[in-house]
Every structure is written in C-alpha cells, then in structure tokens.
Image: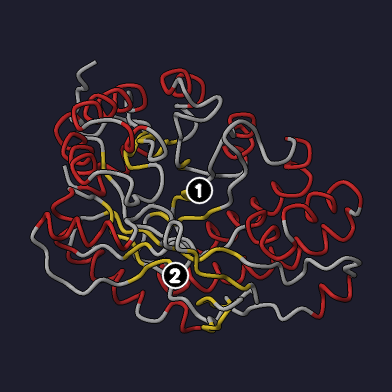
Amino acid sequence: MDRRTAFAKIMNHEEPDRVLVDYGKHIGSFHVNIYEELKKELGVESETKILDKMAQNVVLDEEVCQRLGLDFRWVIPNWVGVRDVEVDGEAGYIDMWQTPHKWTDVGQYYAIHGSPLGQEGLTLEDIENFEWPESHPDMFKGLAEQAKNWYENTDYVVGADGIKVGILQTSSQLRGYDKIFLDFALNPELAHALLDKISETINEMYRQYMKVVGPYVQVVAITDDQGTQSSLMVSPKMFRKFIKPRLKSLIDTIKETADVKVFMHCDGAIVKIIPDLIEIGVDILNPIQPVVKGMEDTKALKEEFGDQICFHGSIDVQQVMVQSNAEEIREEVELRINDLGEKGGFIIAPCHNINVDIPIENTLAMFEEAQKVGKYPLNR
C-alpha cells in the first residue's frame, strides 16, 4: 500500500498495512550535535543545515530519512526577519517578533531573553503600535517547488511544517507568562487586544503559506503548548475564553485555503481539553507524552478519543529514550503501537527533539522496531 493511501486510511480510522513513521519538523528533529554522531553511525556525509535556530535542531538529509524509514517529508518555512546581535556579552538574535534570544551552553541552544511587550502599564496603544511581523514572501520561497516534487514523484505524505508561532506561545513570548496570565485574570480587554493582533498576524501567515504549498501537501502543522507535566497552563475556562476561539480561527483559515488535515503539537497534561481540540478541527494530536499526568495509559486514551482524533508521537524523549536500553525501547514501541494503533488512527514518532542525552543505539532501536512491529494485523 502506498504511503498516501495508508495515511488516508489512518485519518479515516481504518487499518492500513502498517503504522506510518514520522520525524523531521521544527518540533521533532535531532539536535545538531547528536545528528553529527548519527550521520557518522549511518555513514552519511553531508553539510548539516539548521532547521530551528532556537532549538538548534536540523533538516534531515534524504538518506537519513530513508535509513530511519520515515513516511513523511516536510517543507519548512524559511526564517525571516532575524537579526544576529550580542545579548549580555553572548551570541544572540532578535526574531521577527522583536524578541531577543541568548545563547546558552547548557543544552547548546538559544533561550528567550526578554519580552518586548512585557512592560508594566502596557496599553492598547502600545499593542497597536508594536512592530508586528508581516507574511513576507521569502518565508515560503522555494517551498512550492519542493512540495510539488515530492507530491508528483514520490508516494511520501507531504506536510507543511509549522511556522514557529502559536496563540498562547507567542503571547507568552511577547508579554511574558507571568504578565499574560495576570492579564487573563485582571485585564481581559488588554489580553483580548493582544491575542487578536497575534491571531490576525498568524492567520495571514498561514493563509499565504497555504496559497503556496496547499495544492501539494496533505497535512499542515500548528503548534501551541497548553500543558505542563501535571496540568494545563491555564484553566479549561480560561483556555475556552482566550485561546480556543483563536485556535479555531487559525484552523478554519487553513482548511478554507487548502484541502488538508491539521496536525497540532500541544505538549503536556492536556487531557481535559482534548474534546475542545477535536471540536475546533484538530485532526492529528501530538505528542502524546506517556510520562505526563493523564497520558500514562495510552490504551485508555485510545478507547476514549480514538474514534474522534488521530494520535501522533507517544515515544517519550524525557525519560524513556534517555534512561532505557535498546531492548526496553523496542518493548516501548510495541506497547504504544498496540495501545494506539488499533483500527488505525496512529502515527508513531518521538515526542520531541532528540538531544545528546539519548544514546544513538536507542534512537536506531526505536525507528527499527517501529518498522518491524508496526504491521497490521497488530501483534496484540
């Protein structure tokens, strides 16, 4: 069965011939340091290209994708409006949202180092006069040609990777988590004004993105983390008041512009809002972290929601892939496939980026086992 036919069956909650395997997006790739080790292990020689400047993860080489058995290929928006600067004596940059980022040796990545709208006494006028980014054509330069090539000459599922934005994600970046949460409670008019501007900006970016790649892609990624390890960041009531309507607007914008499925990366303990995400049109939910509260029992999760939404991910990179040996990783892969793959509706992947704390042998065991045991009928 070709990959796109298998993907269509998965989305229809039907069993294809195998569980599809995915990796290689801006949330879900290898940190550059471990990627160099992986390429040596696989005998791949190439120039490494950074995908996400902040996380320092990489664009996967085609040979690596093939060796790992990946069934998806992702076009990745180009970073625009980025200025390299020095921040407190360290290397840094300012992104298109005017947010400074500073290099940190711990983890070898760039961390947010200030909020451009984090001042006390922020006003509606300050929000209106902020230098809001625009949907610059360079963001999508070359993507149509790449997507068209994959669409016409391969059977890979072609995806449009997310623009590095989100309703809560970007508002907390601009305002600071402490202040945006206080605004939700104490100054809702200001919060709504800020979120409206963010929503309008993001929607236009995705509208232009879909005009470029929409004819060739089958799935589009969006990102907006709502959870911590043990709870939601805000109450379900506040989520439904401030975040949900604007997420719905984004999903509607995407689906009105292109015939695609929407993949949403939403970290953490988010079980309480899964029905909300289903309601607003999320088709595929990632990352399904089995080490966070409410996600431990993936079989129960499948029983409750598996006929309404497709699951993506489930292989934990915080504890399982770090602390286990290769054989335990293989057992974990089989467990999650059996829990989440019944009647289709499941795509397997690591939950997040693979960093230097994950042994190469564990990574290879994960992808090898996914191909080995992810065949229907499943070995339950």
Q: Residue furthest left?
A: 43
Q: CA distance from mark 2 to mark 1?
A: 21 Å
Kindly identify the residue that appears in the image at 40 percent across and 69 percent down.
Answer: 213
Q: Position of residue 141 (x, y in %)?
A: 40, 81
Q: Which mark is residue 255?
A: none
- The residue that mark 1 highlights is 264
Task: From this view, report whether residue 70 is shown above or below residue 51.
Answer: above
- The residue that mark 2 highlights is 53
Q: Quarter of the image containing the C terminus?
A: top left
Q: Position of residue 169 (x, y in %)?
A: 63, 56
Task: From this view, report whether residue 78 is shown above or below residue 8.
Answer: below
Q: Kindly check if marks 2 and 1 are in contact, taking CB atoms under 8 A apart as contact.
A: no
Q: Amino acid at mark 2?
A: Lys
Q: Position of residue 354 (x, y in %)?
A: 34, 49
Q: Amino acid at mark 1?
A: Met
State the image quarter where residue 233 is shown.
top right
Task: From this view, report whether residue 204 is shown above or below residue 249.
Answer: below
Q: Residue furthest top?
A: 380
| Nearer-the-camera pick, 182 or 270 | 182
Badge 1: how crowded within 10 Å, few (<14), some, or many (20+)? many
- In the drawing, does residue 246 fall left or right of residue 207? right
Helix, strand or loop status at disc 1: strand
